[in-house]
Image (cartoon, grey):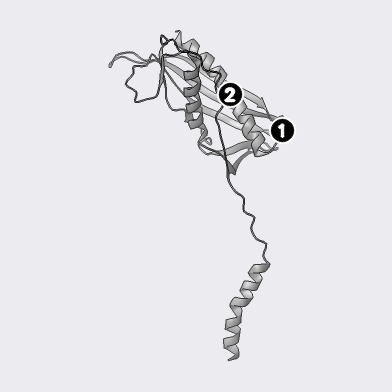
Amino acid sequence: MPRRRIVLAAPLALAACASLLPAQKYTPRANWPLQPAPPAAVANAGTGPVLMIRPIAAAPGLEARGLQSLAADGSLDVDYYNLWAVPPADAVTQALLDWSQASGAFSAVVTPGSRLQPDLIVEGELTELLADPSRGEARAALTLVFIKPSGTLTGTALPVAQAMLKATAPLQGNDPAAMAAAQNNALSGLLTQAMAQLERAALK
């Protein structure tokens, strides 16, 4: 009988110990938009070239959705609780589409699979998007290649220009909201440069 009492008491003792342990704090995940708004749309006269935008690739490490920042020692911190709503490279692809359509410089802006024959193709890679609290800024970098299609099934497409774009924006705090806002602003500056390059390449 004493042995039976010890066995029955063991689960109760374990339950009492478990109740004394501190409860693990629940940290909810937040999704932040990466959608820099384009300038006011310009009326399209329908005489510009047809632009095709291929999906922007992500440099190694930028496939993840976690907000990135540099620690004081220069190491990269990826936040797994504060995420971009979509992968950054996908957001940049959509932003290029939106900004190109709003520019009025093109008669149509299409993606691969369209039946329209493009006059200019752009592709690229997002190489940096992060906050740097020690320098009080957010940074974004993008490499773009502009290609003129041959116009025939047997012809060779030719690159006409390549651009390595960089932009920064002031960081107004070290919290996730401030970091997300600053990175959106840096991306906006990057897209402003990209549009200037796109319109220049369209004239070649």
Which residue is label 2 attached to?
188
Label at residue 134: 1
Left or right? Give the position of 98 relative to 71: left
The quadrant of the image that shows the C terminus is: top left
Left or right? Give the position of 93 relative to 169: left
Q: Residue furthest front?
A: 43
Kindly tell me whether residue 177 is visible in this rendering: yes
Q: Secondary structure at mark 2?
A: helix
Q: Nearer the viewer, residue 154 or 121?
A: 121
| Quarter of the view holding residue 176 | top right
The quadrant of the image that shows the N terminus is: bottom right
For the residue carrying disc 2, how many other residues have a C-alpha within 10 Å: few (<14), some (14-19), or many (20+)? Answer: many
Q: Position of residue 153 (x, y in %)?
A: 28, 17
Left or right? Give the position of 153 relative to 41: left
In the figure, 74 relative to 43: above or below? below
In the figure, 119 relative to 89: above or below? above
Of the two numbered discs 2 and 1 on the same chain, state the one appearing first in sequence: 1
Amino acid type indicated by mark 1: Ser
The residue that appears at 48% across and 27% down in the rendered structure is 94
Label at residue 93: none
Q: Position of residue 195 (x, y in %)?
A: 52, 17
Amino acid type indicated by mark 2: Ser
In the figure, 191 relative to 49: above or below? below
